[in-house]
């Protein structure tokens, strides 16, 4: 069974399409409920975040800890961290490290 993660559905690159193959079935799994910042490390400037977090929700949860992801793709309001990672999204309003994988320590 092929499993396709579904976050916000904002993909313009066919993110919820599967490649035909020898699958007995295809399952699209909604990850929108996985939308929390689980832990933060202000000193290390890092956080553990679930893949279904929308951009504004993510920033709102980081703000009280004095943190920001500083990643603002054009689809920021309507896309998820998991989608950004899956598509290697680039952000605006930043210099140097603008792709999400530049800001990612581990998956």
Image: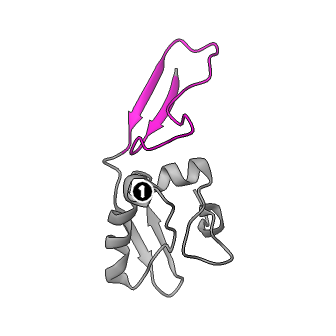
Asked whether, in this view, residue 64 is left or right of residue 2, the answer is: left
Q: Residue at x 38, y 57 (%)?
A: 53
In the image, 16 versus 41, the foreground residue is 16
Magenta span: predominant SS is: loop
x and y percent of residue 37 in the render?
Answer: 37, 65
Q: Which residue is mark 1?
A: 50
Q: Which stretch is magenta?
A: 2-31
x and y percent of residue 24 in the render?
Answer: 53, 11
Asked whether, in this view, residue 95 is left or right of residue 65, the answer is: right
- Image coloring type: one colour
- Residue 83 in magenta stretch: no
Q: Is residue 19 above or below residue 52?
A: above
Quarter of image, res 23: top right
Q: Residue at x 45, y 55 (%)?
A: 75
Q: Residue at x 60, y 69 (%)?
A: 103
Mark 1 residue crowding within 10 angstroms, few (<14) / some (14–19) / many (20+): many
Asked whether, in this view, residue 64 is left or right of residue 100, the answer is: left
């Amino acid at each position: 069974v092929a499993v396709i993660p579904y976050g916000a559905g904002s993909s313009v690159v066919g993110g919820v399409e599967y490649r035909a193959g020898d699958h007995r079935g295809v399952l699209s799994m909604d990850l929108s409920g996985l939308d929390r910042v689980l832990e933060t490390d202000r000193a290390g400037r890092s956080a553990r975040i679930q893949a279904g977090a929308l951009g504004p929700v993510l920033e709102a949860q980081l703000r009280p800890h004095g943190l920001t992801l500083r990643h603002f793709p054009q689809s920021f309001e309507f896309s998820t961290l998991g989608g950004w990672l899956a598509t290697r999204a680039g952000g605006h309003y930043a210099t140097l490290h603008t792709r999400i994988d530049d800001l990612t320590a581990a998956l």
